[in-house]
Image (cartoon, rainbow, N blue to C red):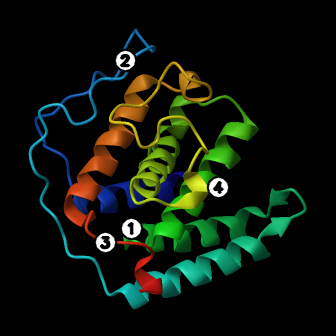
Amino acid sequence: MRSLAISTIVLLLAACPPRSDATVDPEPTDHTSAPAANEGAAAPSCAELPPAESAQAAAEQGMQRLEQSRDGEHYLSGPFEEAMAQLRTAAEQGHREAQSLYGRTLFEVRFLAQAPTPEEREDYVAAFTFLRIAALRGDPAVDGYLPGLGDPQPLVTEEPLSQLPAEWLAEAWANADAWMTCHGSIVGDRGAQ
């Protein structure tokens, strides 16, 4: 799952990279406030999204595989990773429901299993990137899911966000804002239009 998260973050950032000279302190000492997510950011270079039908097909396949990967309250590892890869593809292609489901599922699986670890940074950044995009696009499933997803800055003093390093959240906010700069004119689920 870790290599999947890393490779898909690379793909997301390649499609809409934030300004390259923006820096985030890798070892902040203050976890009570996040650096401004889009402070000094220039317009990203935007890649065109594939056809909406592609996003819809990936979302449907990912949702079906996610349901099939359930084993009671848990997921079967291999099928779960395949399902999440499909959902990630649909999320990157602009499918709002897949963005929401991918972010919520990844956050819940990671956060409920244990306290966040540095090795899980990419997963948390990916989860919050897509949760924020879904919130900004008006997905009802994330409305009230976590505090401040639609706010300009992450609410790092609110639970459960206060348990994550502020720079992880700032990175997710910057990634989401870059995606929205590129593709914010998309309304609803691309495949449902």
Q: Which mark is residue 92?
A: 1
Graded by Cα atoms within 10 Å as few (under 14), some (14 to 19) or many (20 or more), the crowding at tag 4 reads: some
Q: Is residue 181 above or below residue 95?
A: above
User: What kind of element bears circle 4?
Assistant: helix
User: What kind of element bears circle 1?
Assistant: helix
Q: Which mark is residue 134?
A: none
Labels 1 & 4 near each other (Cβ < 8 A): no
Instruction: Say what amino acid the circle numbered 3 marks.
Output: Ile
Q: Nearer the viewer, mark 4 or mark 2?
A: 4
Q: CA distance from mark 3 to mark 2?
A: 36 Å
Instruction: Say what amino acid the circle numbered 2 marks.
Output: Glu
Q: Identify the image quadrant of residue 150.
A: top left
The front one of 17 and 5 is 17
User: What kind of element bears circle 3?
Assistant: loop
Q: CA distance from mark 1 to mark 4?
A: 16 Å
Q: Nearer the viewer, mark 1 or mark 3?
A: 3
x, y (%) of residue 29? Answer: 40, 9
Q: Which mark is residue 105?
A: 4
Q: Is residue 57 above or below residue 189?
A: below
Q: Which residue is mark 2?
A: 27
Q: Earlier in the sequence, mark 4 or mark 2?
A: 2
Q: Residue at x 37, y 73 (%)?
A: 93
x, y (%) of residue 173? Answer: 35, 41
Q: Nearer the viewer, mark 3 or mark 2?
A: 3
Instruction: Say what amino acid the circle numbered 4 marks.
Output: Thr
Q: Quadrant of the N terminus?
A: bottom right
Q: Residue at x 51, y 87 (%)?
A: 57
Q: Nearer the viewer, mark 3 or mark 4?
A: 3
Q: Which mark is residue 186?
A: 3
Q: Earlier in the sequence, mark 1 or mark 3?
A: 1
Point out the residue furthest to the bottom here: 53
Q: CA distance from mark 1 to mark 3?
A: 13 Å
